[in-house]
Amino acid sequence: MTDNQFMGLSPQEATLRVEASLRQRRKREKRFRLMGLAAVALALSFLVILFTGILSKGLPGMFQYYVQLDVELDRARLDPAGDLSAASLYSGDAEALILEASLASIGEEEGRKTKRALRKMVSSGASIRLIEFVQSNPQVLNTKQTIKFAVDDDIDSFLRGFIDRETPEKDRRIDDLTIDIVDRWQAAGLISYELSDYLFFGSASRDAEMAGIKGALIGSLLTLAICISIAFPLGVAAAIYLEELAPKNRWTELIEININNLAAVPSVVFGIMGLTIFIVTFGMPRSIPLVGGVVLALMTLPTIIISSRAAIRAVPPSIRDAALGIGASKMQVIFHHVIPLAMPGMLTGTIIGMAQALGETAPLLMIGMVAFIVDIPAGFMDPATVLPVQIFMWADFAERMFIQKTSAAIIVLLAFLITMNAAAIALRKKLERRW
Amino acid sequence: MAFTTQLSLLLIIALAFYTFAKRSVTSARNRGELFHSLPNYYGLWVGLAASLPAILLLILWSVIDIQLFQHWVRDYYPAEILAAGGSQEVVALAKVENLVAGIRFGDPEAWVVEASSAWSAWEHSSTTAKTVVALLLSISGGFVAYRKISNQFRARNAVERILFWALISASTIAILTTIGIVLSVLFETIRFFQLVPPTEFIFGTEWNPQFEGAERAGTGGGDAKYGMLPMFAGTFLISAIALVVAVPVGLASAIYLAEYSTPKVRATIKPLLEILAGVPTVVYGFFAALTVAPMIKQAGESVGLTVASESALAAGLVMGVMIIPFVSSLADDVINAIPQALRDAAYGLGSTKSETTRQVVLPAALPGIVAAVILAVSRAVGETMIVVMAAGLAANLSFNPLDAVTTVTSQIVTILVGDQEFESAKTLSAFALSTMLIILTLGLNFFALQIVKKYREQYD
């Protein structure tokens, strides 16, 4: 017995012993508490590290370097057919005009080496930009205009300081002549660092300086539109049946077990199901938002059903009883009283489910939404990719500038997700009712 | 988008019927006639009769006619393609379908042109017939339903019965999805096991399906081996690393939040931690591959260790961070469910808060915590993007966290992304791996639920 050790002690001695053990115990208490605090701090510091890592890389990725050139918009050369049609403009000499403008910008007329260097310094999308500019403002033809063009991604990396001018020329991605031209441009104040319009309005491209997320963003929206229009009605209907109408029997139990199991199935498995059922068996095309949306809907269905059931359960029975008491039918009780009262909870669950679907990558890789798609999707049956998959593809590219563009795309994705989650929280706070 | 047009046409007709029926019942009521139900229900009844059967027919027809075309178009294939079967036919079908969609690759063969023009003709007549039949069905359905309306007709009961069945069928989607998942992997897995014996797959320690092409071409260079053990070893290694991070941190923060923090602190910290779970996995993958992996490599090499540039450690650590909120919020729920009376009893005996937590609360919450950890394992095993981006593809049977390993999910993704021949053992092996993955995750989930169920009722 532990009591025995205190037998025969004088009261003073006993007090001393107890005090000693108390000190020990208080110390242990403090240590335990600090451990918990440290764990929370550690977890939060991971969050901080993750976000600073992404932000520090991604914020510069939202900007890029442009060079400002005075281009002589000679109509005869730009638009050989003279009708401003796309065919005529693209067969025109836009590229040469830009090259001449860049030669003029450094005050040189000729020189094969200079020309060759300059051709690689302005983004290869510059001529398209020039043509689009002319198409939307035909009055500028035959005048001299100052236009900003993106610089090539190597020049961009050099300007950001990722390429060291001290490294020997043959180990560098850009040669001495190029660096000299960049210096001259900078001295003339032609280089500017601005918010990247390619990032937000460009579509997929192998050229880092031209790559943008517009196509992926629209693909994401189309996919989510399909996803929500399937998952929300089905999820709410299933929740209503299970909470309000289902008898307690084996069939109902089977449905509930299935819902719980589906919530635990890895997302990549839903992709495999989409691949075999929709693409191989039903012969639907690959890479389309329709299939992606259906797959994501099936994946988010358990989340929506579970949260909708919780919302329905939170509606007090007295409301149902009151409605039944004045002669409403079961369906009238559900559709006139229970659903409107449970709606905030259901919407919250749906928004969280949609946020999950927006960030999902693996199932969409399975159904081929990973293809390199330049065109901006116009409908649910057009090949498309989505934002997370775009991030995955960019992460694989070697160019330095893609790392920043990827981080910038991640920031856009996170901004969407945080907005959606904040909306869910706000909705819950605003409409939540305590009965 | 013919389908959307047809659908909106049907909906407009249904809306017209709804308004018409509702209005005629309303005016009859105003004349003093008595009806069983409110006018709205008569409108709904007619509107549903005008739309539901027609829409169902439309969907069914659209699914079936493509299957029929795919069958009929085989008459146009040259004999050698039909003889070769399998993947040749898939290619032939793709050629025809591309041309139908107006996509031309070079100069298509004569039979492709012929087949695709026949296909277009079928498609055209099918669409016309479909539209006409659906419209007729819709209008006649609406009229029949409208004729049924009388003072005695119980429209509300009829509409509610339809609604009831609609709700039931929505709830069966969960079962259909499960069946879909099982069927989609089952057949391919069986076909795989016809090519590779199950024992070789389950107990094999070598995995190199990339030799498959060479083997079939007969150029030698080694046999393709399909042993799943290296991948499961990799999966468990990475999951174990993730748990070493997530369980202590998650559990300790759950204890702190549940037992020590004030409600206000808890209300701010908990959502912050849950942000970690809301960050898309592709972001974690990017972070692991670009920031964590090089850091670990550098740190390891500075103390003289050889570290693979895609080490299991990097993927595991980042995955652990992702799982922290998963463990902490589940454990938090469990700890909060322990009745206050137990704590009060311990305080009454003079124990400190930490003693109460360690010796009373945690033992009582243990089953729930174990279940939470098992669910976290299941999550880690099924996680895909982090390992695809950060763990590499080398199928090493290794338990060294500094080596590159591969996992089940990353192999599935690598094999199935892009266009594959659907007949090869390599492609089929991905389905066998998925079957194993499903069995494993569902098993873990089932196990966790059993634990929860068995020990839950103690304090209720």
Image (spheres, coloured by chain):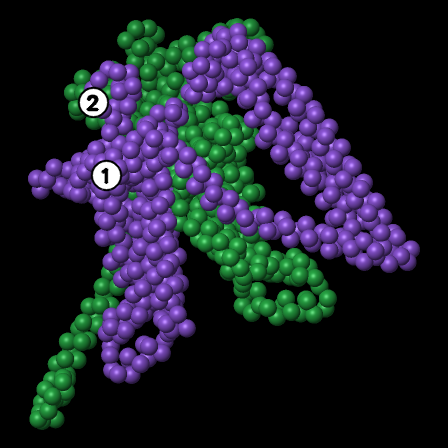
Chain colours: A green, B purple
> B316 or B366, which lies in front?
B366
What residue appears at the point 77 percent right and 48 percent down from the top-left corner?
Answer: B43
For numbered disc 2, what is the local secondary structure?
A: loop
Chain identity of mark 2: B
Locate residue B182: give its quadrant. top left
Tags 1 and 2 on a common chain: yes
Q: Position of residue B381 (x, y in %)?
A: 31, 45
Instruction: Classify mark 1: helix, strand or loop.
Output: helix
Residue most toward the right? B31
Under mark 1, the amino acid is Phe
Residue at the spot x=15%, y=78% of the render?
Answer: A23
The residue identified by callout 1 is B203
Q: Is residue A168 above or below residue B459?
A: above
As measured in the structure, the alpha-carbon distance from the residue carrying label 1 to the one carrying label 2 is 19 Å
Front residue of B262 and B430: B430
The answer to whether residue B353 is visible is: no
| Residue at (73, 28) in percent of width and height | B132
Query: Mark 2: which amino acid?
Result: Gly
Looking at the rendering, which quadrant does residue A179 occupy?
top left
Which residue was labeled with disc 2?
B222
Picture quarter with the C terminus of chain A: bottom right
Q: Is residue B398 above or below residue A152?
A: below
Query: Callout 1: 10 Å neighbours few (<14), some, many (20+)?
Result: few
